[in-house]
Image (spheres, helix red, strand yellow):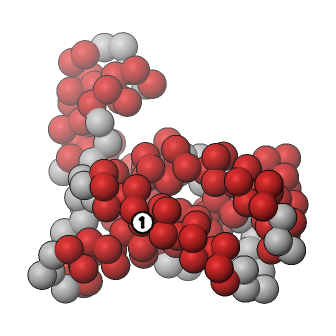
Amino acid sequence: MQTASTDIDLWNAFKQGDKESFAILFRRHYSLLLQYGVKLCPDVNIVEDSIQELFGDLWQSRSDGEVRSVKSYLLKAVKYKILKNQKKNTSLRSSQLEDDLLFEISHESFLINKYEDKQRAASLIEAFSRLPNRQREIIYLKLFQGLSYEELTEVMQINYQASRNLFYEAIKSLRKTLS
């Protein structure tokens, strides 16, 4: 939790015009935003441009809005930047983009992080790929990025109980498919 308070302290200093705090926030969260972004959009250039645009906009505006979690705020903001830039680069409507959002977790992350047994990992990957996009997204954010339910509500724009229910349903679906 110390990272969150440190992030908030850095955020508040950045809002007062501290360039070093801004640079630290950028360095601290860039890889997380990039990892999350490529799960939303396979075009790395769009993701990198969106992250750069986000931080440029943040520096320009420095609005006084309250931020409870810098991590969830940045994840949510980069998601919308990516959708906006993807929309700009394609003829798809924004609602289609959200419905058809490419959201995959690499086979390697499952194999390295959670399962030594290749047979079980393959079954888990197959079960995961059958989940709806929103369920895959919430599992990724909760389990692999360690977001709390409060942070999930902000990133996914759903209420607290809906985030708990969605996560529960995703895990329940995985268990059912695996059994």
4 on left or right of 140: right
The residue located at (80%, 54%) in the rendering is: 20
59 on left or right of 168: right
Question: 52 or 137: nearer the eye?
Answer: 52
Q: How far across and down, in percent of the image, does residue 39 sit? A: 33, 52
Residue 110 placement: quadrant: top left
111 on left or right of 157: left
Q: Is residue 74 above or below residue 104?
A: below
Residue furthest out toward the left = 91
Q: Is residue 68 above or below residue 4?
A: below
Query: Does any portion of residue 8 appear in the rendered image?
Result: no
SS for callout 1: helix
130 on left or right of 74: left
The residue located at (42%, 66%) in the rendering is: 50
Residue 132 placement: quadrant: bottom left
Q: Is residue 105 above or below residue 134?
A: above
Disc 1 marks which residue?
A: 50
The residue located at (31%, 26%) in the rendering is: 108
Query: Does any portion of residue 121 appear in the rendered image?
Result: yes
Q: How far across and down, in percent of the image, does residue 115 sit? A: 38, 20
Q: How many marks?
A: 1
Q: How far across and down, in percent of the image, does residue 127 sit? A: 22, 42
Question: 123 or 105: nearer the eye?
Answer: 105
Q: Quarter of the image for the C terminus: give it.
A: top left
Task: Tell me which amino acid carries mark 1.
Answer: Ser
